[in-house]
Amino acid sequence: MLCKRIVAALAATLGLCAQQDTSTHQDHSNTVSQRGDQVMGFSHEKTTHHFRLFPDGGAIEVTANDPGDAESRAQIRTHLSHIAGMFASGDFDAPMLIHSRVPPGVPVLKRLKTEVAYTFEEMDGGGRVRIRTGNRKALAAVYQFLRFQIADHQTGDATGITQPADEK
């Protein structure tokens, strides 16, 4: 099912890319959101993304905006559990489809895939992919990747390194 979504998203992405007016940042943001909805399988309007940088890596967090939205919560958890497995195997196709380019840090994360752990964790309202590494080159790549996500998704998250709330 995920492969079908990725193939459908790629086809849609190619169509969107042909139509995309790259002259404004807002057009880019809208296109990223549209592709994201297709690749992730849930609405960006019904969910909130956060990207966190931690001393040992970081996290990709997604929660449903409405605590009673069981459908979005289930879709988030399904997607993020797949993403954790894909990233662990060095497969970063999903972010490449969403952003129409290879995000910074991805080549290093692919090369050092055995040095980075990607773990899916449920959260109230959704879930997260917790990223951990003890390798300094991989850590720098994780930070590049997450900072790119913060900028391209316009989340407003801190780009500095913080402590995880549940580990303070």
Image (spheres, rainbow, N blue to C red):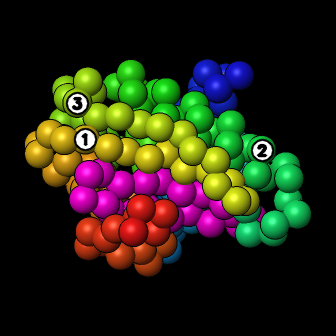
Q: Which residue is mark 2?
A: 74
Q: Amino acid at mark 3?
A: Glu
Q: Amino acid at mark 1?
A: Thr
Give the camera-side residue of 149 and 100: 149
- On screen, residue 29 above or below 135: below
Q: Disc 1 vs disc 2: which is toward the camera?
A: 1
Q: Is residue 92 visible?
A: no
> What crowding class fits label 2: few (fewer than 14 Cα within 10 Å), some (14-19), or many (20 or more)?
some
- First in sequence: mark 2 vs mark 3: 2
- On screen, residue 17 above or below 88: below
Residue 13: percent from left, percent from top? 55, 41
Residue 58: in magenta span: yes
| Figure quadrant of residue 108 | top left
Mark seen at residue 65: none
Q: How many marks?
A: 3
Taking the spot 72% from the left edge, 59% from the top edge, the residue there is 125
Horizontal side of residue 31 vs 137, given as left or right: right
The residues colored magenta run 44-63
Give the camera-side residue of 100 and 122: 122
What is the spatial separation of the Cα atoms under label 1 and label 2, in whole angstroms?
28 Å
Secondary element type, mark 1: strand
Q: Which residue is mark 1?
A: 133
